[in-house]
Amino acid sequence: MTEDIPARLLIAIGGNAIHPEGIRGTPAEQAEVAARLGAALLPLMELDTQLVVTHGNGPVVGKILMRNVLARHRVAPMSLDILVAHSQGGVAYVLLQALENTLRAVGNPREVVCMLTQVEVDPEDPAFANPTKPIGYFYTETEAAALREELGWEMREDSGRGWRCVVPSPMPRHIVETALIGTAAASGAVVIAGGGGGIPVVRDEMGCRHGVEAVIDKDRTSALMANLLGIEDLMILTSVPRVAIDFGKPTQRALERVSLAEIRRHHADGQFPPGSMGPKIDAAIQFLEGGGKRVLIGRLEDAVPMLRGETGTHIVADEVEAPRHAEAV
């Protein structure tokens, strides 16, 4: 089935695509990774399509958190909202430069901009009473106790691998810079926004915003941003070509095109674990329930073929009689 190229598109890139495992994260390594990302995104940037790009910050914010720990006796530790802002700005700068350089190398004058993005959350969100999102490095039990005492961190043991800091991950409720992001995208620029799920803020009774200690799920923020901008197509990039059911079993099957109702049933059956594909499916459902038309999940290098309906998993708002499956994987 061949699909039309959409006029507007939001692309969500994972944190590991920016800072993959196996690198130290030196400036040269980050520039090299970003250059490869720019080359992969070039076919999309050369389309006559409004583009908004969001990105994760997982490994990066963890490293900034470690700097807090190592320097805490010399430099006052920063709050988590500021750490997210640091990671958002740093990753966006490296990504912006790589995308611009990729465009200029082929003579394309298209502009790229990054938008520091605040995301409002509900101060009464249950996540604040039950922090579950692990960030940063692993520590020994003794180190964890010291950090809990000194910095007030919530520390939990992680599957026998050590102790990690866990933080609240509230639902995004509003994206402060929505109008500015939409205006920049409509001007033709590629807009990088919502990095790391956005900087978490709450608004008081006077309407003033204040940062809070939390990390917002990047895919949830991407879904909300696309809904608020009226974008009907959301592309979530992963390391796998398609979403699979019965993953790791002899009956494993890759989903090609499924309805919202069908993906809900698979999710209810426990097909998508919280630590892997689950958050992406949650975001896909949120986006479609919020008025979106199509979610595409697949690999970065398959982005344009995905838009044409040639690969990837397509989750659509309209009901279809039955899901179509690709070859067993």
Image: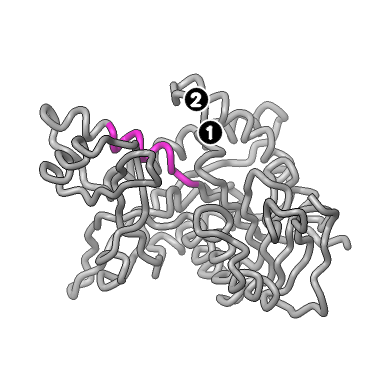
**Magenta region: which residues?**
56-66
Q: Is residue 57 magenta?
A: yes
Query: For residue 258, which quarter of the picture?
Result: bottom right
Q: Residue furthest top?
A: 28
In the foreground, 222 or 25: 25
- The residue identified by callout 2 is 23
- Would residue 253 be seen by someone viewing this image from the given angle? no
Q: Residues within 10 Å of mark 2 (few under 14, many from 20)?
A: few
In the foreground, 94 or 160: 160
Q: Is residue 15 left or right of residue 78?
A: right
In the foreground, 152 or 198: 152
Q: Residue at x 82, y 79 (%)?
A: 321
Query: For residue 235, which quarter of the picture?
Result: bottom right
- The residue identified by callout 1 is 20
- Would residue 215 be seen by someone viewing this image from the given angle? yes
Instruction: From this view, report whether residue 37 is shown above or below residue 271.
Output: above
Residue type indicated by callout 1: Pro
Q: Is residue 135 left or right of residue 10?
A: left
Q: CA distance from mark 1 to mark 2?
A: 7 Å
Q: Is residue 133 left or right of residue 9?
A: left
Dot 2 falls on a residue whose secondary structure is loop
Give yes or no for contact between labels 1 and 2 (Cβ–Cβ under 8 Å).
yes
Dot 1 falls on a residue whose secondary structure is loop
Q: Position of residue 273 (x, y in %)?
A: 55, 59
Residue type indicated by callout 2: Ile
